[in-house]
Amino acid sequence: MKKEICILLAVISIFSLFFGCSKDDIEMDDNVDDNVFENYSEADNSSSQDTIYIDSGVVDYENVNFEYNGKPLEFDYKFNCSADCEMGLQLFVNGILQQFTVDNQEYSLYKVNCRADTDEIFHISFSPDNGKKGESSSLIFANIYNPEIIELKGDVNTFGNFQKISQPMPWGIKMNVDATQKEFAISNDSNNYDEHKFTEEELNEFIKIKDDGTKINTLDEAMYFDTSKDTEKISKSDEKILTFNLKGNLEGKYRISLYGDFEKISICGSDYIDIDVKKNTQYSIRVPIEEIENCKNVYAVAVALDNSQGLIKSSSYYIE
């Protein structure tokens, strides 16, 4: 079957109070794990609402695996939206951001101005830059809604759905030969993050009671990648550290990377940080503001290497 992703995206316009605020309404097909827009609620009952359907995926490919034999992988990719919008695409192989070619130009983020109800199809060519013969590498198609640098003004702001990332389930690449390896600084040093085992009292905060009275630990349901900040604005003069917190009970290794204005930037002196996640534990990565002060927008992503959780994006932050 085709591996495509269908998104129902409701975007709210709230006059001058919010920049890009949006409602938590989305539909996806079975190829998508979770609702990446679920954490945003309607901020004003008087707000107007437009619903956007976004359909994306590899075109006319009946498998969910590619085979790499030393030549570039070639395929067509499609966006189709029910209203005009901009979408972006990034590729990750084993959690490492890839360079790929469209129309003989190389990109790590390719942007498409989508016209309503029109197939926007482009041809991708790329060779994975990591992976060993005999392995099955993970390939993630990261679809970014409105991948533009956003400036927040005033005291009450949110990115809303802007810069949110959706994805189908990870694809696979059967490595019949070694990839031409690039050099990446991947840190496994636990000194780059703080590890905190939740107390029983703290775990109670993650317990949810269902209608039938059953108690569930929400940490068992998904991974969470967030910070303790209440706002998505960072003041360089007032703040010294931005802390990203990864937690959830889907155990395994997660590869963390940091992005400033959509370019991958260093995180704690490395290209990537690998964390072995254990149950009921929070992992906190502290990024000095001085290392990101030249960027307008900053976010981080965590990519699962040992399970099908895929990519988890933090909130985006505006640096003023």
Image (cartoon, helix red, strand yellow):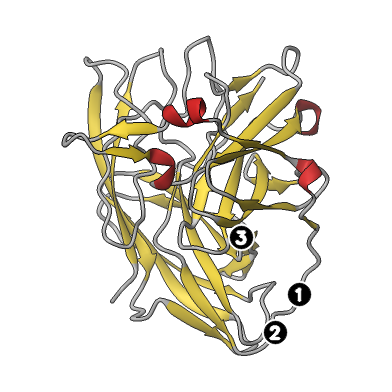
Determine which residue is flagged by label 3: 95
Q: Residue furthest left?
A: 212
Q: Where's the N terminus, which quadrant?
A: bottom left
Check the image and report above or below for 75 versus 254. below
Check the image and report above or below for 201 versus 305. above
Mark 3 packing: few (<14 Cα in 10 Å), some, or many (20+)?
many
Determine which residue is flagged by label 2: 178
Determine which residue is flagged by label 1: 181
Residue contact at pointers 1 and 3, CB within 8 angstroms: no
Query: In percent of the image, x 48 and y 61: which residue is there?
Result: 141
Q: Residue furthest front?
A: 200
Residue 118 rendering spot, x and y as whole percentages: 29, 57
Q: Earlier in the sequence, mark 1 or mark 3?
A: 3
CA–CA distance between discs 1 and 3?
A: 14 Å
Nearest to the observer: residue 307 or residue 202: 202
Nearest to the observer: residue 272 or residue 292: 272
Query: In percent of the image, x 45 and y 79: which residue is there?
Result: 65
> Helix, strand, or loop for circle 3?
loop
Quarter assignment of residue 52: top left
Residue 125 rendering spot, x and y as whole percentages: 56, 74
Query: In percent of the image, x 33 and y 44: which residue is there?
Result: 84
Check the image and report above or below for 179 versus 27. below
Residue contact at pointers 1 and 2, CB within 8 angstroms: yes
Mark 2 packing: few (<14 Cα in 10 Å), some, or many (20+)?
some
User: What amino acid does circle 1 point to?
Assistant: Gln
Q: Earlier in the sequence, mark 2 or mark 3?
A: 3
Query: In percent of the image, x 33 and y 50: which residue is there?
Result: 115
